[in-house]
Amino acid sequence: MLTATVAIVLVLSGLCVMAAMTNVAMERKMDVGLMKAIGGSMRRVLRLFLAEAALLGLAGGMIGAAAGIFLSVGLGKAVFGVAARPRLIVYPVAVALTIMVAILSAYPLRRLASIRPASVFRGEA
C-alpha cells in the first residue's frame, strides 16, 4: 500500500515538473527567438532548457528524498515505535521516473525550439 502511494506521489510530482517546464518554455519564447536569431541551434536551445530541467529535478528530488526519509523514520518511530526503512525497489523506481519526466519535459521544449525567430518577434508564435 505504501509503495503504491509513493508511486502515485512520484508520478504526480513528475507531472508537476513537466507542467512547470511547459510554462517556463512558453514564458521564454522571446528568449528562444533571440537565441535562434543570433545563431543558436535547436540542439543548443534544447540543451539549455534540459539542463535547467535537470537541475530543478535534481534539487527537487534530493529535497524530496531527504524529507521523505526523515518523515518516514520520524513517523515510524512516533507511531509504531520502529524506524521504517524504504525498500530497495524505491530507488530504481525513483530513478526511472526521473528519466521519464526528463524525456516527457523535452516534448514542449522541442516544439518551442523549432519556432522561427521572426514569428516570435512579430508576436505570432
Image (cartoon, rainbow, N blue to C red):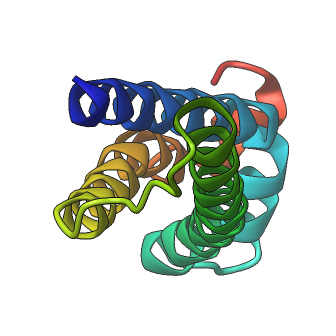
For the residue pair 20 and 82, the one nearer the viewer reads as 82
Q: Residue at x 22, y 27 (%)?
A: 4
Q: Position of residue 7 (x, y in %)?
A: 29, 34
Q: Quadrant of the N terminus?
A: top left
The single residue placed furthest to the front in the displayed view is: 81
For the residue pair 52 and 77, the one nearer the viewer reads as 77
Describe residue 26's horizontal placement relative to residue 92 as left or right. right
Q: Residue at x 52, y 35 (%)?
A: 80
Describe residue 22's horizontal placement relative to residue 27 as left or right. left
Describe residue 49's horizontal placement relative to residue 6 as left or right. right
Q: Quadrant of the C terminus?
A: top right
Q: Residue at x 21, y 70 (%)?
A: 88
Q: Residue at x 83, y 44 (%)?
A: 30
Quarter-wise, where is residue 49 in the image?
bottom right
- Residue 62, compared with residue 90, is above or below; it is below
Q: Position of residue 86 (x, y in %)?
A: 36, 59
Q: Position of residue 55 (x, y in %)?
A: 67, 72
Quarter-wise, where is residue 48 in the image?
bottom right
- Residue 104, compared with residue 48, is above or below; it is above
For the residue pair 47 and 17, the one nearer the viewer reads as 17
Q: Position of residue 3 (x, y in %)?
A: 24, 36
For the residue pair 117 and 60, the one nearer the viewer reads as 60
Describe residue 15's horizontal placement relative to residue 40 as left or right. left
